[in-house]
Image (tube, rainbow, N blue to C red):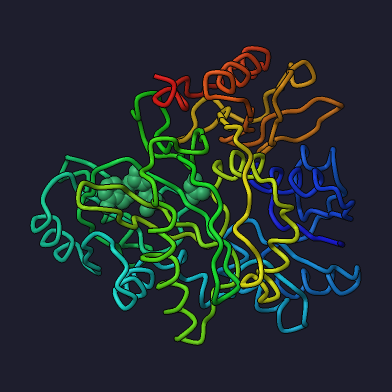
Amino acid sequence: MRILVLGSGAREHAIVSSLLSEPEAHQITAAPGNAGIATVVPVVALDPTRGDIVTEYALDNDIELVIVGPEAPLVAGVADALRQRGIAVFGPGKAAAALEGSKTFAKRIMDEAGVPTGKAARAGTLDEVATAIDEYGAPYVIKADGLAAGKGVLVTEDRDAALAHARYWLDHGAVLVEEFLSGPEVSLFLLSDGHNVLPLSPAQDYKRVFDNDEGPNTGGMGSYSPLPWLPEGFVAEVVDTIALPTIRQLANEKTPFIGLLYCGLIVTDKGIRVIEFNARFGDPETQVVLPRLVTPLSGLLYAAATGELGSLPTPEFSDDVAVAVVLASEGYPEDPVIGRPITGLADVENVTIAHAATALVKGEFVATGGRVLSVVATGPDFAAARARVYAALDTIHLEGSHYRRDIALRVVE
Ligand code: AMP
Ligand code: GLY
């Protein structure tokens, strides 16, 4: 198949690697891709948020499937532009992508569909924020309504900090005040063709920058899959009580969701609750889910894009486990130092590297952003996979960089 992958992160690198591992040889192009992706497939420099440009490229190059990695092109309506021209695309149109692009839209859909989630109040003024946080009590959860690249959420015991965060985001639009939910978090990805869903294997993401979940939230510092501590029937319950009702609600509203429904869940003592939906694969969870996928990815995504998911069995996963650890630049997430060389990448063993923010300068990789790359290993158990990842991280050098040392440690202990 001729496949175009939109995006430039470690997630897209993992998607490309998964496609390349299939028995069928595909012609894959990434746009714009990154320096790591460019070592395995051709990349083209085009703006993935421009529906007109992406569609023209896809038509000129007889692309049979477009896979949209990040949220920005989805929210910009790139999938709509492609679909209008009859091109198969894995990724929801603008209206359904509002499930991620607008937290108030997501809450309304959940309400209508009867999906379990925490209480939330939309606030347009600081007075409304103050009223809501005093009603829910500490810890306070304040969220920007729109896309905020992982920076929109603050969970804090400090009322003044909550109000300051709200004041900042009120300048950009409304904010949501949420009831605090407590429990382990799960990321579950489900493929959808607009009517049917198929679950992938659950993963866990580590959002805080430092070990023991200290420091500010980030885009994600590491992940592992599967989650051996989940109760039996967990995935089926999410399919029945969360994913299918949400997909049906969107279909009823004539905005079918075709793509990846990312359910960000908290397992509270009162049951499973949705904390967020995303409209695309998660990063860094994709880096641990896809290496375990046995069923060819392209067939699944093509079936979702063409309304044929109902005829497929649930995707199969290997019994191997996977661990990913993100290498971050000095100063991430506040103020990452960029431009420094990364050495040792050629010497690592038993891992794969998913590049995120790297560039090739005079034959040497340099860091170009905060989350630089993910080191990913599979293994028969978490101790083995962790040992491989951390041995590789010992070999890789980036001055001032940091990474969490406790990814998947809980499951080993
Ligand atoms: P989000 O971007 O909505 O996934 O939020 C980022 C992180 O903030 C989540 O992964 C949780 O760790 C935390 N969080 C978000 N909403 C809540 C909530 N209602 N209660 C507790 N923690 C939350
Ligand atoms: N890992 C969180 C996200 O992709 O949104």
x, y percent for residue 350? 72, 21
x, y percent for residue 397? 66, 16
Q: Residue at coordinates 86% horizontally, 26% vertically from top-left? A: 363
Is residue 165 in sight in this rendering?
A: no
Q: Is residue 48 left or right of residue 93?
A: right
Instruction: Decide: is 207 above or below 280.
Output: above
Q: Is residue 91 left or right of residue 30?
A: left
x, y percent for residue 171? 34, 62
Res. 376 image quadrant:
top right
Is residue 30 in sight in this rendering?
A: yes
Instruction: Decide: is 221 above or below 86.
Output: above
Instruction: Decide: is 322 above or below 294.
Output: above
Q: Residue at coordinates 61% horizontally, 21% vertically from top-left? A: 389
Instruction: Decide: is 237 above or below 307.
Output: above
- Quadrant into which the C terminus falls: top left
Q: Residue at coordinates 38% horizontally, 41% vertically from top-left? A: 230
Given residues 322 and 91, the one toward you in this image is 322
Q: Is residue 218 left or right of residue 61?
A: left
Given residues 127 and 74, the one toward you in this image is 74
Res. 379 image quadrant:
top right
Total number of numbered discs in the rendering: 0
Res. 192 image quadrant:
bottom right
Given residues 144 and 287, the one toward you in this image is 287
- Quadrant into which the N terminus falls: bottom right
x, y percent for residue 375? 63, 28
